[in-house]
Amino acid sequence: MKHGRMWQLAADAPKLRHQSPARRFWESVTILHRRRISVIAVFAAVAILVHLVFRFVLRAPLEIYQIPLLATLVFGGIPLVYELARNLLRREFGSDLLAGISIITSVLLHEYLAGSIVVLMLSGGEALENYALRNASSVLRALAKRMPAIAHRRKDSVITDVALDHIVVGDTLVVYPHDICPVDGTVIEGNGVMNEAYLTGEPFEITKAPGSAVISGAVNGETALTITARRRAVDSRYAKIMEVMRESEQNQPRLRRLGDQLGAIYTPVAVTIAVLAWAISGEAVRFLAVLVIATPCPLLIAIPVAIIGSISLSARRAIVVKNPAVLEQVSECRTAIFDKTGTLTYGDPKLTEQLIAPGFEQRDVLTLAASLELYSKHPLARAVLAAAKEEKLALRQASYVSEPPGQGLRGIVSDREVQITSRKKLIAQHTPGAEHLPPITGGLECIIVIDRCYAATFRLRDAPRAEGRSFIQHLGPKHQFRRIMIVSGDRESEVSYLAEQVGITEVRAEQSPEQKLTIVRQETVHAKTLYVGDGINDAPAMMAATVGMAVGQNSDVTAEAADVVAMENSLKKLDEFMHISRRMRSIALESAVGGMLLSLGGMLVAAAGYLPPVAGAVTQEIIDVLSVLNALRAAFPPKIISDMPEGPLS
């Protein structure tokens, strides 16, 4: 097959069809519906402004200047009241219930300006919060948009484009340069590289040769590869990650807003005062006046302002808060769950010992092992390659590479059979020379077999972060965590070694992404959880935890799944985030409770008949300004933003 033909096929790949005008119209309607709260807020603000111009500038008659207010109450008030009524039927009593009652009462008493101001306050506060909140489905979109719609199937020397759903196990597929691999498979022709960062979280390219396994979602390098499909598209690794992510997204914990918690106390008090004012005076307008000034805008506006201020401060500290709800929740987390590699360690293993068996030369063993590791996606491969580079060894090309289940990495290098495996697998194979195996120690190791004989044990260390122990030891006293765990896909000995180094006693080793997800869900049932990781395999667990935090920028999908992303690869950023969160909660409470107390004073004045509804609405706006000004303090850094001890603790 000529390259010209290959590129022609790529150029002829089907493009997205142009949407019809009717489809575009209905999609626009759908978008407007999703953003209806923001639309209502903008409409109410414009309508009130038009009302004021008609009334005080143009001196228009009553019938004219009330039209914008009536429009606001129809197009904004009715949808908001309808939503509140639905919540009421579901026994969800939020802090915005007072606003709904105020809107209805203002219409009944013909106090349209007061009602319109309440519509603006209610929709504006909710729109501000919705603007800050992320759309969780962006994780799935980030995954889905990377996958190709078609694959290039070769049959009888003819290449045709087929939909992914039509690929079956055993099909021969051509992966063009820079294409995304459509399914899991095995290379049968060609030598090249693939970038599997999206699947492994490791930002490096992996060499491929005949026999090498390829994973769906990996990006091909400069040369075309021909592969045999080992799984259908729906069964491939990338699709499985999407499936777990979708399931995790649908089962996220429901977080109660801080404002609703306060509103559960505030709302009954306000309604009681309003009813008593009406009952004692016999004037229904006092009922409205009390509710208007009672409308809990310090809860609806000041809290989102404190949240957005904290998001801004976090961003200046290289911390990206993608889900503002976690700012309210992280201080309540009592179980901390950490991934191992790249989270509590630097994610950069070093080859520390080469224990060579009798009859083998160290340079020959390292050369053959490193030549085979060129084709490996395992993090330890980089350590072996780095050691070979440091010794200035000339690596050789493998003529065949395979990774059969349970046997480790195998290949033919310079006509010699090389295998890189584990101690357990070596003993199970009854390999000659196994009696020369060194004793088991903590940390990482890989076993080298050459020409079916034990040749060497390579020992490696992935160093714990310098601040790891001090960070872990201060989580309980300073942040009230009761349980701290490591949940890792690595083997038991190396995870236990790290746990001992950083001072963690609960260890779950050799866990798949699905098992991590199950563990996090089980722990979240008993207490709110914080999950910290860095690889794509951590993404489902992050989404299931109360708060998920990604450390570093190894995986775009992990960053999408996380609630918080620390752009700098340091645990100190996690400590800073917890301090910013705790301070945000304190400022938000000050703003909300302070505003509520001022509103309570205003309610008593209104109940006595000295504050009509419109004046009450204006007074409420003054209270809002004071609450918001206090809430803005969250955007400025405090004197102490981290109390983590500097350096390691013994």
Image (cartoon, helix red, strand yellow):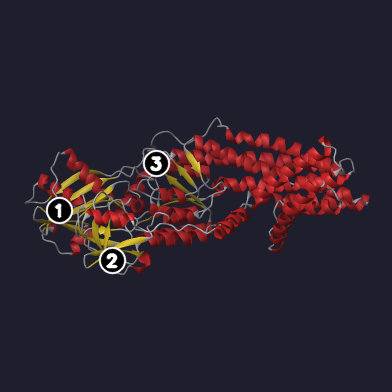
Asked whether the residues under the numbered discs 3 and 1 touch, taking CB atoms below 8 Å apart as contact, a structural biologist would say no
Q: Which mark is residue 249?
A: none
Q: Residue furthest top?
A: 639
Residue 447 is situated, as x and y percent measured from the top left of the image, at 19, 54
Amino acid carrying mark 1 in the image:
Ala
In this rendering, would 62 be left or right of 197? Answer: right
What element does badge 1 sit on? strand
Residue 394 visible in the current orientation = yes
Gap in Å between the C-alphas at discs 1 and 2? 22 Å
In this rendering, would 286 be left or right of 169? Answer: right
Q: Which mark is residue 398?
A: 1
Q: Nearer the viewer, residue 271 or 80?
A: 80
What element does badge 3 sit on? helix
Q: Quadrant of the C terminus?
A: top left
Q: Which residue is mark 2?
A: 230
Q: Residues within 10 Å of mark 1 (few under 14, many from 20)?
A: many
Q: Residue furthest left?
A: 359
Amino acid carrying mark 2 in the image:
Arg
Gap in Å between the C-alphas at discs 3 and 1? 40 Å
Query: Can you tell which of label 3 and label 1 is closer to the viewer?
Result: 1
Between discs 3 and 1, the one toward the N terminus: 1
Residue 533 visible in the current orientation = no
Q: Which residue is mark 3?
A: 468
Q: Quadrant of the N terminus?
A: bottom left
Amino acid carrying mark 3 in the image:
Gly
Gap in Å between the C-alphas at discs 2 and 3? 41 Å
